[in-house]
Image (tube, rainbow, N blue to C red):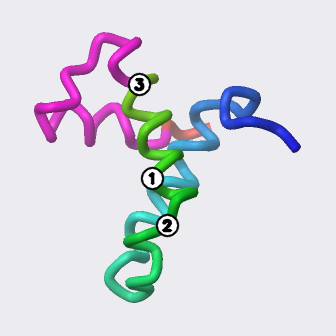
Amino acid sequence: MKSLTEYPVEELKLIYHLLHTQMPQHTQLIGSDLLQDLQDYLLQQARDDGVDVAVHKQWNSWLQPSEQ
């Protein structure tokens, strides 16, 4: 099994975005360890890229999957 570090960040952003948008319809995602681990990993990647993740607009902008 791969760890999160072995996947492309853009792929992880897309998956996180899709899961996060489904939370209102699927409330069981709120307590998901996998979703939390994914978020924590992406937050660290954003910080490493110089994003102030405490500023929602910066975090949200960084999180948007780029067009491929």
Image location of residue 51, percent across then percent down: 26, 19
Q: Which residues are magenta?
A: 46-65
Which residue, as the protein is rendered here, is positioned at the far right? 1
Q: Quadrant of the N terminus?
A: top right
Q: CA distance from mark 1 to mark 2?
A: 6 Å
Q: Toward the viewer: 13 or 5?
A: 5
Q: CA distance from mark 2 to mark 3?
A: 19 Å
With respect to residue 59, does 49 lie above or below? Answer: above
Q: Which residue is mark 2?
A: 32
Q: Earlier in the sequence, mark 2 or mark 3?
A: 2
Picture residue at 45% right of the left edge, 56% below the top:
17
For label 1, the crowd category at 10 Å Cα-Cα, with few meaning under 14, some 14 to 19 and many 20 or more, is some
Picture residue at 38% right of the left edge, 69% below the top:
21
- Say what secondary structure mark 1 lies in: helix
In the figure, residue 58 lies in which quadrant? top left
Q: Which residue is mark 1?
A: 36
Q: Toward the viewer: 62 or 20?
A: 20
With respect to residue 2, does 6 lie above or below? Answer: above
The type of residue carrying mark 2 is Ser
In the figure, residue 63 lies in which quadrant? top left
Disc 1 + disc 2, Cβ < 8 Å: yes
Q: Earlier in the sequence, mark 1 or mark 3?
A: 1
The type of residue carrying mark 3 is Gln
Q: Which residue is mark 3?
A: 44
Image location of residue 67, percent across then percent down: 54, 40
